[in-house]
Image (spheres, helix red, strand yellow):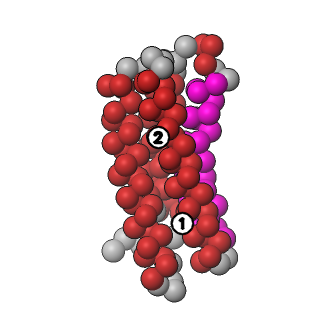
Amino acid sequence: MDTVNSYRDLKVWQRAMDLAVLVYELTRTFPKDEQFGLTSQVRRASVSIAANIAEGYGRSSKPSYLNFLRIAQGSLKEVETHLILSARVGICPEAATDPLLTEADELGRMLRALIVRLEQHTDR
């Protein structure tokens, strides 16, 4: 097992950062009139995933860490919803959102696995 010295060593945090980068790349193609709408919403939610993983890791208690991981899960669902909506309203093609949704699904599984593991064990 890999040694974890920082939240940056967590694969789930690294994947969350990757998803945020993908969201930023995709939203650069969104219409300018969406700058303060879906573009802003999906970007903030995507950043929130990694940020909450990091913030939770830095907390001194496991219950607090778990709470932040659950908030990250909520932000992930928000990203998925924004991506699905952007395709449904024609802001971008579904083919552009599908890879991000696949990545989001995998990230969701990773987050759930981390939460279950933390709930079952007393140590990080």
**x then y, percent, for residue 63:** 62, 76
- The residue tagged 1 is 6
Asked if residue 42 lies left or right of residue 89, the reply is right
Pick out the residue farthest to the bottom: 122
Quick one: SS at disc 2? helix
x and y, in percent, of residue 11 in the image: 41, 59
Callout 1: few (<14), some (14-19), or many (20+) C-alpha neighbours within 10 Å?
Answer: few
Q: At 40% from the left edge and 53% from the top edge, which residue is drawn?
A: 107
User: In this picture, is 116 found above or below 12?
Assistant: below
Amino acid type of the residue tagged 1 in the rendering: Ser
Q: Nearer the viewer, mark 2 or mark 1?
A: 2
User: In this orientation, which residue lies closer to the viewer: 82 or 27?
Assistant: 82
**Residue 25 is at least partly visible in this image:** no
Q: Quadrant of residue 96?
A: top left
Position of the N terminus, as image quadrant, is bottom left
Q: Nearer the viewer, residue 58 or 66?
A: 66
Above or below: residue 35 compared with residue 62? above
Give the residue type that dot 2 points to.
Glu
- Magenta segment boundaries in residue numbering: 37-59
Report helix, strand or loop for mark 1: loop
Is residue 112 shown in magenta? no
**Residue 124 sits above or below residue 72 on the image:** below
Instruction: Tell me, yes or no, if residue 59 can be seen here.
Output: yes
Give residue 25's mark: none
